[in-house]
Image: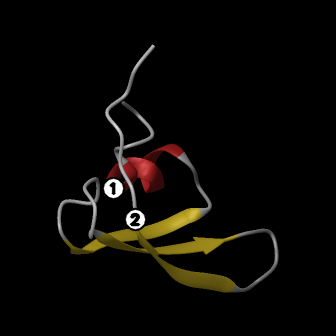
């Protein structure tokens, strides 16, 4: 799924400047991903996401 491919976000959305997997694979429980985004203001925001729960995609 596209949503799970967070490492490719900078190529899809110009506001995502950097995405780095700090721990794990970025998809499974316990993974930590650091993101840097920048909006229209001249400031960047860096934050970390931790996967706390994961479900297999279903339709």
Q: Is residue 16 above or below residue 20?
A: above
Give the position of the C terminus as an image quadrant: top left
Separation (CA) of disc 1 from disc 2: 18 Å
Specify the label residue 7 is tagged with.
Answer: 1
Left-right relation of 27 to 34? left
In the image, residue 37 above or below residue 27: below
Q: From this view, report whether residue 8 is shown above or below residue 25.
A: above
Q: Of helix, strand and loop, which one carries label 1?
A: helix
> Residue 21 appears at what percent x and percent y?
27, 70
Of the numbered discs 1 and 2, the one sitting upstream in the chain is 1
Give the image quarter of residue 25.
bottom left
User: To which residue does mark 2 refer?
Assistant: 52
Q: Position of residue 11 (x, y in %)?
A: 43, 48
* Disc 1: CA contacts within 10 A as few (<14), some (14-19) or many (>=20): some
Please state, as top left, top right, bottom left or bottom right, where the N terminus lies in the image: top left
Displayed quadrant of residue 52: bottom left
Q: Which residue is situated farthest in the top direction here?
A: 59
Tell me the SS state at disc 2: loop
Residue name at image x 35 percent, y 49 percent: 54
């Amino acid at each position: 799924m596209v949503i799970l491919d967070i490492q490719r976000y900078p190529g899809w959305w110009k506001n995502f400047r950097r995405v780095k997997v700090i721990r794990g694979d970025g998809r499974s429980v316990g993974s930590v991903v650091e993101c840097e985004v920048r909006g229209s203001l001249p400031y960047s925001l860096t934050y970390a996401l931790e996967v706390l729960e994961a479900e297999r995609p279903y339709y």
